[in-house]
Image (tube, grey):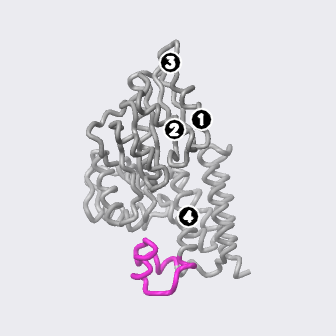
């Protein structure tokens, strides 16, 4: 996360996190909350969407308390606030309350720019959270993640990780964390290869590959093996989502050379060839069904269900059936 403001105090009265990269936005919030709770373990955190912050709500949340408690108020999607609520926020920016940190998450586009300008004018702390669309940006992100964990990884290892995992920043961050926890010494390309291309028991992508190929039994076997060896369920849902989305992207793209499609779709060329092989049997309806299955599984593994493993098994079977729809 890049800082643009002259100061970098997480407990500044106002922080604006600007951009559309969900992981970086979440980290910006987590940093403020962690700092507030380090200062006061009883900090009250209010995390609101734009439609939950109605006119008058901010005044209620920031009004003086008899107990003088520290509070963090997070507003997501600040660019979508109503005109009346934006007036409330701008008024608050001029005289922020003590012991309260306001965090505004803003997409950074033209919509709601007046609110951003007002926050910048009063010297709000700003964190840039841009969407990382370029492979070079993701490569820099992976290197920074290893450095933040105090670990050394070769340039070839970082590149191999980006090539294997793709554009999902959460998946990249999870992979770096897993490698840092499991591997001693410098992490090289061979280590990445063992984890993410050559070792089924440690790779969420093996589960996804078998599922989108319609090989339900093998996908379930890979799923159970991965879970038994400690692969986080959220990594598996992320891999499933990437696999299905890749099918959808490539099926709707114009024909062309792998290198041209790779640039258009943001995939490495080798993945274009693999996805083309996996596309047989898929229909647009099948892709829609599979995406719904992934969304349900994602909710299940993040606390929306009682049994994350069952949620994953259900999704794997649904995806494999969708992959075989055209074959009958």
Closer to the camera in the image, 132 or 248:
132
Is tag 4's residue or tag 1's residue first in the polypeptide sequence? 1
Which numbered marker is on residue 55? 1
Which of the marked residues, 4 or 3, is nearer the chain's N terminus?
Answer: 3
Q: Quadrant of residue 117?
A: top left
Vertical side of 254 occupied by 246: above or below: above
Range covered by the magenta-colored residues? 250-275
Q: How packed is label 1: few (under 14 Cα within 10 Å), some, or many (20 or more)? A: some
Q: Return the residue at label 4.
A: 207
Where residue 172 appears, x then y in whole percent? 41, 57
Pointer 2 with pointer 1, Cβ within 8 A: yes
Of callouts 1 and 3, which one flags the residue occurring earlier in the amino acid sequence? 1
Mark 3 closeness class: few <14, some 14–19, many ≥20 residues within 10 Å: some
Magenta run includes residue 164: no
Residue topped by disc 2: 87
Front of the two marks 2 and 3:
2
Name the residue beneath numbered marker 3.
64
- Counting from the top left corner in percent of width and height, residue 294 is at 62, 59
Q: Secondary structure at mark 1?
A: loop
* Closer to the camera in the image, 79 or 174: 79
Neighbourhood count class around disc 4 (C-alpha, 10 Å): few under 14, some 14–19, many 20 upward: many
Task: Please tell me which of labels 2 and 3 falls first in the chain.
Answer: 3
At label 2, counting other C-alpha atoms closer than 10 Å, the crowd grade (few under 14, some 14-19, many 20 or more) is some
Which residue is at a point 29% across and 42% down the rendered structure image? Answer: 5
Of helix, strand and loop, which one carries label 3?
loop
Q: In percent of the image, x 56 and y 44: which residue is there?
A: 83
Q: Is the Cβ of the residue at disc 4 closer than 8 Å to that at disc 3?
A: no
Marks 4 and 3 sit apart, C-alpha to C-alpha, by 53 Å
Lower sequence index among marks 2 and 4: 2
Disc number lying in front (4 or 1): 1
How many marks can you see?
4
């Amino acid at each position: 996360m890049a800082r643009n403001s002259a100061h970098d105090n997480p407990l500044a009265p106002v922080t604006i996190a600007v951009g559309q990269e969900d992981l970086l936005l979440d980290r910006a919030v987590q940093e403020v909350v962690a700092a507030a709770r380090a200062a006061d373990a009883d900090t009250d955190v209010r995390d609101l969407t734009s439609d939950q912050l109605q006119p008058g709500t901010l005044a209620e949340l920031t009004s003086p308390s008899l107990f003088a408690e520290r509070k963090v108020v997070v507003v997501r999607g600040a660019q979508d606030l109503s005109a009346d609520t934006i007036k409330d926020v701008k008024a608050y920016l001029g005289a922020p309350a003590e012991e309260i940190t306001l965090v505004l998450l803003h997409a950074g586009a033209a919509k709601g720019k007046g609110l951003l300008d007002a926050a910048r004018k009063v010297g709000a702390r700003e964190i840039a959270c841009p969407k990382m669309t370029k492979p070079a940006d993701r490569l820099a992100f992976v290197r920074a993640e290893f450095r933040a964990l105090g670990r050394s990884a070769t340039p070839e290892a970082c590149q191999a990780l980006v090539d294997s995992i793709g554009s999902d920043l959460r998946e990249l961050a999870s992979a770096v964390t897993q490698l840092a926890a499991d591997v001693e010494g410098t992490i090289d390309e061979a280590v990445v290869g063992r984890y993410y291309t050559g070792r089924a028991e440690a790779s969420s992508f093996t589960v996804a590959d078998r599922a989108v190929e319609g090989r339900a039994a093998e996908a379930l076997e890979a799923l159970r093996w991965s879970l038994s060896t400690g692969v986080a369920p959220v990594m598996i849902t992320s891999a499933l989502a990437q696999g299905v989305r890749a099918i959808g992207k490539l099926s709707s793209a114009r024909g062309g050379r792998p290198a041209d499609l790779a640039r258009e779709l943001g995939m490495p060329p080798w993945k274009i060839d693999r996805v083309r092989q996996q596309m047989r049997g898929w229909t647009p309806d099948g892709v829609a069904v599979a995406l719904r299955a992934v969304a349900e599984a994602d909710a299940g593994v993040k606390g929306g269900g009682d049994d994350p493993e069952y949620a994953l098994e259900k999704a794997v079977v649904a995806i494999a059936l969708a992959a075989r729809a055209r074959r009958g």
